[in-house]
Image: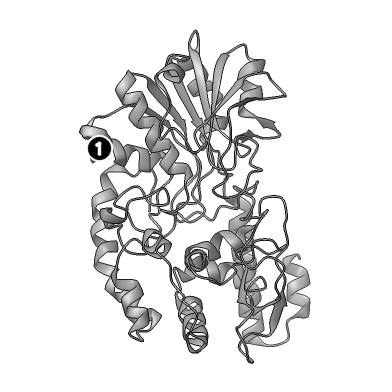
Amino acid sequence: MSAQDIYCKMTTPKLLISALLLCIALAAQAQAPRVIPGDERTEVYFPLLEGKRIALFSNHTGMVGDKHVLDILLEHGLRVTAIFSPEHGFRGQADAGEHVSNSVDKQTGVPILSLYNGKEQKPSRESMQKFDVLLVDIQDVGLRYYTYYITLCRLMDACAEHDKSIILLDRPNPNGHYVDGPVLDMKHKSGVGWLPIPVVHGMTLGELARMVNGEGWLTQGRKCRLTVIPCLNYTHATPYRLPIPPSPNLPNMTAVYLYPSLCYFEATPVSVGRGTDKPFQLYGHPDLKGDRYPYTFTPRSLPGAKNPPQLGKTCHGVDLSGLDEEDLRTKGIDLTYLIEAYRDLKPTGRRFFNSLFEKLIGVDYVRAMIEQGCTAHEIRARWQQDVEQFKAQRKPYLLYEE
């Protein structure tokens, strides 16, 4: 819509002011320079790879325009000797938590060494002998329980042990504009929580990797040789729409923005929409009743959700897929959905929380406060000191303006 079109439709001063503000916002957006991820800066990192055996840690998100970074490397004669793949596999099609075996990439013939095969917690000594430098290009979403950064930490540990260098091609964090949630109590360290950081840490993978090195969070406090290729034209305030879904059950930005608020349902009997066309955009359960739960859905077996919670059962719940994206982006963690479902299912006598909950939320007191009847606002106030302390702690490692 042009400024002239908007003007012609406005008939009151208030509407004229609104139209003017809209035009200013649209003009500012049009003039904002495009964010350039690190992997597009080939002129910076290609010279660092010349003559080296390269292992690539990436998946389906490692795209440079319409080509995968692997193809770009091979087209320029660079020697890729191995691929390390995370949860969901190199092509991003496996279920959450599904073990993925070693294989060979059918399109290039490069061996794929799975780091999510249910066996090794880190690469084998044999795997580490296959390369000189590890190149990292993978899209994260900035949450403590999103496992790509955990795989990166394990690779950093192995590279420090075997004296291998890492070049990390940084990407924007779609949840990089805020910090929220309690810092992980390390007694709850697990495969869905690896570092003493808040649920939403507000850092890119490059910044987080710098912090891991700087804070001595690798085994025995050692450091790896790390080079981060930063994004251009990016700040932590820059809205960034993911061009590719980072995993099967985060298909769009609504799901990405709701994920910090809805993931805790994974530690309850409530479905969060896996096995539907709106994963992490709705929630429900067969025993939820009443006007608060007008939406019904039935989880099915689908690619990326082969055996979802409440498979084949009609669930009553809430559809959040129509909420305004900008409101969700600025809302932060909202435990209201979880608290309401807990209170409404409690009379059924059904056990609500399981032990995964503390691994996801990272502390003991949140479950206790919910069971004691505390509000989402009261619980969130409890972790604000964590947030402020972490923001000060992370500051030396930031690469982009806040």
Q: In x, y percent, where is residue 268?
A: 50, 70
Looking at the image, is 227 positioned above or below residue 59?
Answer: above
Residue drawn at (58%, 37%), measured in percent from left and top? 100
Q: Please indicate whether residue 268 sits to the left or right of residue 385 in the image.
A: right
Crowd tier of the residue under label 1, counting other residues whose Cα lies within 10 Å: few below 14, some 14–19, many 20 or above: some
Kind of residue at disc 1: Gly
Q: Which residue is mark 1?
A: 214
Q: Please indicate whether residue 367 sits to the left or right of residue 61 in the image.
A: left
Residue drawn at (51%, 38%), measured in percent from left and top? 116
Q: In x, y percent, where is residue 165?
A: 38, 21
Q: In x, y percent, where is residue 238?
A: 50, 54
Looking at the rendering, in which quadrant would you find the N terminus?
Answer: bottom right
Q: Please indicate whether residue 232 sits to the left or right of residue 383 in the image.
A: right
Q: Nearer the viewer, residue 73 or 117?
A: 117
Residue drawn at (72%, 68%), measured in percent from left and top? 312
Looking at the image, is 242 positioned above or below residue 386?
Answer: above
Q: Residue furthest top?
A: 51
Give the colour scheme of this rendering: one colour
Looking at the image, is 257 positioned above or below residue 74?
Answer: below
Looking at the rendering, in which quadrant would you find the C terminus?
Answer: bottom left
Q: In x, y percent, where is residue 145?
A: 44, 54
Kindly state the secondary structure of the residue where label 1 is placed: helix
User: How many numbered discs sit on the rendered protein?
Assistant: 1
